[in-house]
Image (cartoon, helix red, strand yellow):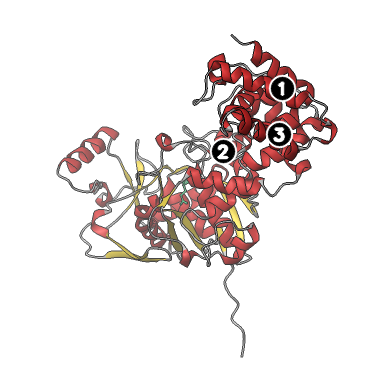
Amino acid sequence: MTKVRKPEIRVRVAPSPTGNLHIGNARTALFNWLFAKHHTGKLILRIEDTDLERSSLEFEKNILNGLEWLGLKWDEFYKQSERLDRYEKHLKKLLEEKKAFWCYHSKEELEAEKKEQTQKKEAPRHICEHKYMNHESGIMNQGAGIIRLKVDENSHRTVRFEDIIRGHVEFEQRVIGDLSLAKDLRTPLYNFAVVVDDHEMKISHVIRGEDHIANTPKQILIAEALGVSLPQFAHLPLILGEDRSKLSKRHGAVNFDEYIGAGYLPEALVNFLSLLGWSSKDGREILTKNEIIEQFSLEKVHKSGAIFDVKKLNWINSQYIKQFNDEGLTSLVMPFIEKYFGKQDKVFVLKLAPVFRERLEYLDQVKEFKYFFGEPEYEADILVWKKSDKEKTHKALESVLEILSSNLEWEIFDEKYIRSELDKLAEEKFGGDRGAVYWPLRVALTGEKFSPDPVEIARIIGKEKTLNRIQVALKKP
Ligand code: GLU
């Protein structure tokens, strides 16, 4: 028996460079990449920059940087602005075949029509009488017109497709109207350029956000007019904020750059984004890239919206941070530390690595550890533990100073021993209230109410600084 060769899987990421990389586009790009990788197919990156007024090279660069940072490599790269000849060729053909026509309605007329339809609660569409006019030279523009596809508004047809994620989807053809294809022969519009490209680039699957679902019947009609076959469609669920409305700025950062800047790790973001609308077989939430690739399938993508939960992202990121050894973590945090606290000694930062490993959710949080890099500043009041008073606080700090400055060997700082001494102090002089001892020590060392364990901090900053900070606290009014 002859083997039937499976058609090649070719998917595309098609960002419009009219803004910086958005978290939603990053998720769409990732799902395309995962699908391509799972099937050993190809990923095509296509910059949809036909809207010259709104597109910019700067946005394009930002998008490419973000995708590269995530580790999503593409196999082919195109820019629509470099393909105008292709669109022109197809537009001319459609005009010659009288499947497309020039519409000479002014912007104002079209807007007035749209307004009226919206008031009547009808779906906005333009049914253009110009399609019945037989212009002499069909392909030449006779004035300030745009090119539209002739769509029979009297048809009872429903345009249908089977979406891999959403199942059967259908739209009535009547409501579509004579949709616009291009502003002129060399200025194609979105739906038209996409169909030409998906065909010429041999795209097998269009995987994109659900917000494009209403464009799909239009693209099907265009493909039919061009006489080209259709890719399979898979529309990904929207990303929602925690209140279940469409994710927007008010829910937090939607700009991908902000996550890079805050020190999230690319592997953690890949892991987190992959779970926005998809889940692993056994429900595990920490998965390597290879595990995700291996398990990924569009059939397992959820239909309902995916909630963007920053707490979950932080948890996932902290799990990735924990996987680094001291050296690795030190190199990761160093740029963030130096951004806030200036040049630092690597040997010292190495000592902080265990604290960071335990506590950081994302790298920019190193800014909360300023007491490691300079003397703390605080009001004397906060030295006083809630169940204590000024006098007792003073007494506690004096005793702590005595314990710490006595002949302990700081070279081999024995945390266990020091803790037992401090506990004994609490027991003997403060009726077993450990807070009376540890709280003022914590504030003296950090200037903060919340921090890692003060004994650990003492070990890290060393004898001299520790004793000095307690003395400073004792002198506070
Ligand atoms: N350029 C479109 C966008 O950025 C892509 C649409 C599509 O994938 O067809 O939303």
Give the amino acid at mark 1.
Leu
Give the amino acid type for the residue marked by disc 2 in the picture: Tyr
**Residue that mark 1 sits on:** 401
How far across and down, in percent of the image, does residue 280 sit?
Answer: 53, 63
- Residue with the mark numbered 3: 421
* In the displayed structure image, the side of residue 293 where residue 388 appears, left or right: left
User: With 184 as the anchor, is 470 left or right in this view?
Assistant: right
Residue 78 seen from this side: no
Identified at 20% across, 42% down, the residue is 118
- Cα distance in 3D space between marks 3 and 1: 12 Å
Under circle 2, the secondary element is: helix
- Which image quarter is the N terminus in? bottom right
Q: Residues within 10 Å of mark 3 (few under 14, many from 20)?
A: some
Q: Which residue is mark 2?
A: 259
The answer to whether the beta carbon of the residue marked 1 is less than 8 Å from any atom of ligand 1 is no
Q: Is label 1 in a helix, a strand or a loop?
A: helix
Q: Amino acid at mark 3?
A: Glu
Q: Nearer the viewer, residue 270 or 122?
A: 270
